[in-house]
Image: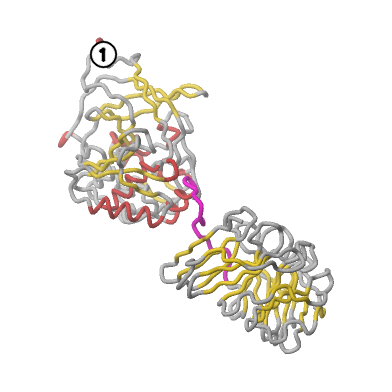
Amino acid sequence: MKQILLAAVLLAAACDAGLVTGSDAPQAAAIPEQAFPGEIGEWRTGVVRTEAGEFEVTYQAIHGKAVLDGDVILPIPVEPDGADPDDGIGSSTHEVAAIIPAMRWPGGVIYFNIAPDFADPSRVWNAINHWQANTPIRFVQHTTQPNWVEFVNGPGCSSNLGMIGGRQPITLGDGCLTGQAIHEIGHAVGLFHEQSRLDRDSYVNIYWNNIDPEMQNQFQNYIQLWSGFDIADDLAGYDYGSIMHYGSCDFSIYPQCTPLVPSGRVMLKKDGTGIVANRTALSSGDIMGVRAMYPSPGFTYYGHWRWGHGIGSNRQFLADVTGDGKEDAVVYFGNTGSWYVAPSYGSGFANYGLWISGHGIGSWNQFLADVNGDHRADAIVYFGGGGDWYVSLSTGGGFTNYSHWRWGHGIGSSSQMVADVTGDGMADAVVYFGSNGYWYVAPSYGSGFANYGLWRWGHGIGSNRQFLADVTGDGRADAIVYFGNTGSWYVAPSWGGGFADYSLWISGHGVGSWNQLLGDGTGDGRADATVYFGGGGDWYVAPAVH
C-alpha cells in the first residue's frame, strides 16, 4: 500500500523559466491526473530542512503552483514565471520558508465544502460516499474549523498531500470524474502514487525511453523525488490495482499505446503484462492502508484466516485451548463426537487437527471453558436426560479422555452455561429454569463439579436470552437476562456464593435485533451488551459502566 508523509519544513528556491503549453508540448498517449493538463513548467528545486539535515525536492512551477508528480500541489510560495534572477526573486539563494506538515486529519475527520460554482457536485458526493463506505475517513461540512478542503473548478485534477493547514483546494476539472475525485481525495488523506514506492522496482519495469522526457520525473520513487529523504512509509504489499497507481501508457510518447498492446508502454509488471489504471474504486489494499494510517475504534479490514475447517460441523467455537493467550477455532461433529482444533498463530488459524473423538455423541449441549484453572479451555458436554456433565481436559495439544464431572444437575432446565461465577479461575456449571427464574450453580473444584446450589430465584422469567458474563469487572461472571420486546437487560451480580438481587441496567437496547451477545469490547474488564441487526449488518454496543 501507500506512503504516509512525515513532518518537514520546506524551503523553496525559485529559478527563472518559461512555460511550455499546447502543441509545443510532447504528446502523451494517455493522460493520468494532472493539475494543468498539457502544460509543462520549469523544474525548480526546494530544500527540505529537518533535524537529520537538508534534502532537495524537485517540482514544476506552473501558474504560481509547485506541482509534484503531476497532480500534487506543494504549499511552496512560487515566484512569478520569468522573474529576473538579479532582483533576488528568482535567485537560487532566495529561500522562502513554507511548512509541509503533511499531517493526518485528526480522528480521520475531513471538513469540507464544495464551491458554489462547482460543476457537477455529484462526482464529489459519489467519491465522498465511497470513501466513507470503505474507510474510517469521515467528511463533515465545514463551518468555522481552521483546516478544511474545498472542492473547486480548475483546468485539471489536483490536491495537496495530507492536511497542510488552513484551506486547501481539491481541484476537479471537467475531465475529472468520480474515480479521479476518489484519487485526489487519496492525496489529501496522505497517499503518494503507488508506483513511487521504494520497492516498486521489484514489481514493475520502467521503460524510460518510452516516457515523455518532460514527464520522466513522475516515475521516480519518493526517495529520488526528495533527493534521498525518506519522507514516507510503505504499507502492506505492492498493489497494482490501487487507485493511486499509474497505467502502462501514462505519459507515453507513443499515441498508439494501449495497456494491453506491447508497443510504447512505459511500465509493465515483472511478468511483462500491462497495467490498466484503476479509477473506479479503492482497492482492498488501499482500504487496508488507509485503515492502518487512521486506526479507529472498531474492527480492522477482515482477512481470510482459514479454509475447509468445520464443513458439516454442528457447533463452532472460539476459545484458547492451547493456553498461549490466543483463541483458536474449534469445531464439533455430533455424530462422531469429534472435536477439531485449528490453533491461532496471531494472523491466521493453522491447519486443523483432531483433538478427541467419541466425546459428546448424543449430548444436549457442548461448551469450551477452563474448568481446572490452567488457562486452557476444556471440552464439556451436557446430557439433559440425567443431568450429566462430562469433561475432556485440554493438554495444550489435545483433549484427554473424558470423565464424569457431575450428575443430576440441570434435569429439565431451560438453558445451561459454563462460566467462572465464583471468581477462582475455574469455570462452573450453571443451569437456568425459565418457569421460575431459578439459577443453580455447581462450582468447579478442578477435577469435578461440586453439589449444585440455588444461587438466584425469580430472575429472568419470560426472558428471551440468558447469559453469564462479568459486567461488574470483579472477575466473577454475573447472571444477565434479556427481554426482546422491550430491549431490557437485567443483571444479578455474583458475589462469589450467589447472585445478588437483579436490577435493570438498560432498556430499549436491541429491540428487533437478530442476535445478542456479551463481551468486553472496550477492554476495561467489563462485558458490554452488544446487539446485531442482520438486515444492515449493524452492531450496537452498550458499554458496562458499573
Q: Residues within 10 Å of mark 1 (few under 14, many from 20)?
A: some
Is 315 on the left-hand or right-hand side of 155? Answer: right
* Residue at figure coordinates x 33%, y 29% from the top left: 75
Image quarter of residue 159: top left
Task: Tell me the element at label 1.
Answer: helix
* Residue at figure coordinates x 32%, y 50% from the top left: 182
Q: Is residue 104 magenta?
A: no
Q: Residue furthest top?
A: 86
Which quadrant of the rendered structure holds the C terminus?
Answer: bottom right
On the image, the x and y values in percent for residue 177 come to: 24, 51
Note whether 2 is above or below 499 in the view shown.
above
Image quarter of residue 435: bottom right
Task: Give, as a three-letter code, the residue at label 1.
Answer: Pro
Note whether 498 is above or below 189 in the view shown.
below
Q: Is residue 351 in view?
A: no
SS assignment for the magenta stretch, majority: loop
Note whether 500 is above or below 451 in the view shown.
above
Q: Residue furthest bottom?
A: 385
On the image, the x and y values in percent for residue 393 come to: 79, 71
Q: How many marks?
A: 1
For label 1, the residue is 85
Note whether 252 is above or below 313 in the view shown.
above
Q: Is residue 305 magenta?
A: yes
Q: Relative to the observer, which residue lies in front, 178 or 216?
A: 178
On the image, the x and y values in percent for residue 262 come to: 32, 52
Is 182 on the left-hand or right-hand side of 535? Answer: left
Q: Which residues are magenta?
A: 292-307
Q: Is residue 123 in view?
A: yes
On the image, the x and y values in percent for residue 79 come to: 26, 21
Image quarter of residue 170: top left
Q: Relative to the observer, which residue lies in front, 181 or 244?
A: 181
* Residue at figure coordinates x 58%, y 61% from the top left: 528
